Image (tube, helix red, strand yellow):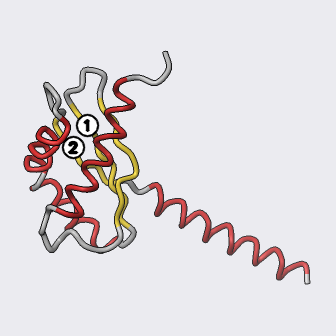
Amino acid sequence: MGYQRTDRLSEEIQREADEIIRHELHDPRISGTWSITRVEVTRDLRYAKVYVSVLEDDKRDDLMKALESAKGYVRRVLFRNMHLRYTPEVLFVSDRNIAYGVHIAQVLSEVTKGENHEES
């Protein structure tokens, strides 16, 4: 079917939500290295899952709590900025794929070092 409306809306919400969180939310719990990895909007445009990746594990819970408490504000600003008839309800989800990828890379590096050490 090609490039659907939900795909375009997901990308736009990702850009807008990132701007809102970085520049308009002044919660001290929102700190450290984090990024919005992707947004999935349901076909009926009622919900938008915003996947947030946090590099520091110790800051993940605080960041997710801060985002959960600010989701109403984020939705209002999205409505104001995007001029939609209906703005999706925002659901923040912790995305651990990057941390998992780093872990796998470390394991593979250790295995490779072990094999090289055994050969010499």
Please give left or right for residue 3 compared with residue 16 in the image.
Answer: right
Q: Which residue is mark 1?
A: 48
Q: Which residue is mark 2?
A: 91
Please give left or right for residue 9 compared with residue 68 in the image.
Answer: right
Res 104 quadrant in image:
bottom right
Mark 1 crowdedness (10 Å alpha carbons): few <14, some 14-19, many ≥20: many
**Front in this rendered view, residue 3 or 106:** 3
The structure residue drawn at horizontal position 21% and vertical position 59%, both measured from the top left corner, is: 21
**Callout 2–callout 1 Cβ contact below 8 Å:** yes
| Place of residue 12 in the rendered image (x, y in percent of width and height, measured from the top left) | 32, 40
Amino acid beneath label 2 = Leu
Q: In the rendered image, which quarter contains the C terminus?
A: bottom right
| Place of residue 27 in the rendered image (x, y in percent of width and height, measured from the top left) | 12, 69
Amino acid beneath label 1 = Ala
| Place of residue 35 in the rendered image (x, y in percent of width and height, measured from the top left) | 36, 60
Q: Is residue 86 above or below residue 10?
A: above
Q: Is residue 45 above or below residue 79?
A: above
Res 67 quadrant in image:
bottom left
| Helix, strand or loop status at disc 2 | strand
| Helix, strand or loop status at disc 1 | strand
Q: Earlier in the sequence, mark 2 or mark 1?
A: 1
Q: Is residue 61 above or below residue 9?
A: below
The structure residue drawn at horizontal position 25% and vertical position 56%, both measured from the top left corner, is: 19
Dot label at residue 8: none
Q: Is residue 60 above or below residue 39?
A: below
